[in-house]
Amino acid sequence: MRALLWWLLPLGLLIGFVFLGGALFSTDAHTLDRHAILLPPSAEHLLGTDRLGRDLFARVIEGGKNSLIIGALSALIGSLLGLMIGITAGYFRGVVDRSVVVLIDLFLTFPTFFLLLTLVSYVDASVWMLIVVISITGWMGTARLIRSEAFAIGAKPFIKILKIGQVGLFRILFKYYAPLLAPIFLVSFTFGVSGAILAESALSFLGLGITPPQMSWGSLLAEGKAVIDVAWWVSFFPGLFIFLITFLLVQISDRLQALFNQRDLQSGA
């Protein structure tokens, strides 16, 4: 548990910096300054400026909000979708389960990123549209894990007794299935946030994601590739924040999984 807290602390500080930094740093992320084009990091511009003279520190804060919102909401919707589909397959079994397996395999047949590219090419990119698109391509892994665990739960004697006693479906699912499936959902969600942030960053880097005047870490990274030879900081700092947030989330996901595995071993003993 202590190891998990050591990773949660820097994650909380990073999220706090993104969402509260704007209140402490008054420079506008959209203000142009023709006298401050491509200035390196300094006391006046902590992370330097871009090719239009805009302060990169302010833009990293503003872009981080969109990146984190897209990542968190996409992972939440995708995990909830995977949870519902997985429970449905594991509880009803039979034809329902076979249909769900076919659906999951159908989605997994296409490489996820190319499926993302296909979907965004037919819609106008925006924060909410990216959330929907990334969610659609991010539920399969959670669904497979939940389905497998739901099968194991459904085989337990007390679940069979509840079914024989004609206990309501929603009561069984929410009172008995949900607590047992919560660890899997939490781990999948945490890992899914990092995947969604990377997916959004990749799409924005290719010009298929967030478009000006909106910004994200991915779009800021893309803006800097044209001047990377003369202004390394324009791409470096957005890329650094993408690395930090995904690294922290993956570490937290691993610690959560280890914690839940340890608890299951102790309960089994």
Image (cartoon, grey):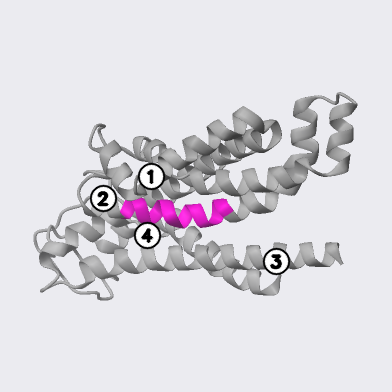
Q: Which residue is mark 2?
A: 204
Q: Which residue is mark 4?
A: 25
Q: Is residue 27 visible?
A: no
Q: Which residue is mark 3?
A: 259
- Horizontal and vertical percent position of residue 181: 70, 47
Amino acid type, mark 1: Thr
Q: Does the magenta run of residues contain 35? A: no
- Quadrant containing the C terminus in the rendered view: bottom right
Question: At numbered mark 3, what does the secondary structure look like: helix, strand or loop?
Answer: helix
Amino acid type, mark 2: Ser
Q: Are marks 1 and 4 in contact (CB under 8 Å)?
A: no
State the extent of the magenta-drawn residues as a range: 188-201
Instruction: Give the class, few, some or many, for how many residues have Cα within 10 Å of label 2's Cα (few <14, many ≥20).
Output: many
Give the foreground label among 4 and 2: 2
- Distance in Å between CA atoms under marks 4 and 3: 38 Å
Nearest the eye: 226 or 101: 101
Query: What secondary structure predominates along the stretch shown in magenta?
Result: helix
Q: Which residue is mark 1?
A: 109
Which label's residue is closer to the chain start, 2 or 1? 1
Indicate the quadrant where residue 202 lies. Answer: bottom left
Indicate the quadrant where residue 255 lies. Answer: bottom right
Amino acid type, mark 4: Phe
**Residue drawn at (39%, 43%) of the image:** 134
Q: Is residue 87 visible?
A: yes
Question: At numbered mark 1, what does the secondary structure look like: helix, strand or loop?
Answer: helix
Question: At numbered mark 4, what does the secondary structure look like: helix, strand or loop?
Answer: loop
Question: At numbered mark 2, what does the secondary structure look like: helix, strand or loop?
Answer: helix
- Distance in Å between CA atoms under marks 4 and 2: 25 Å
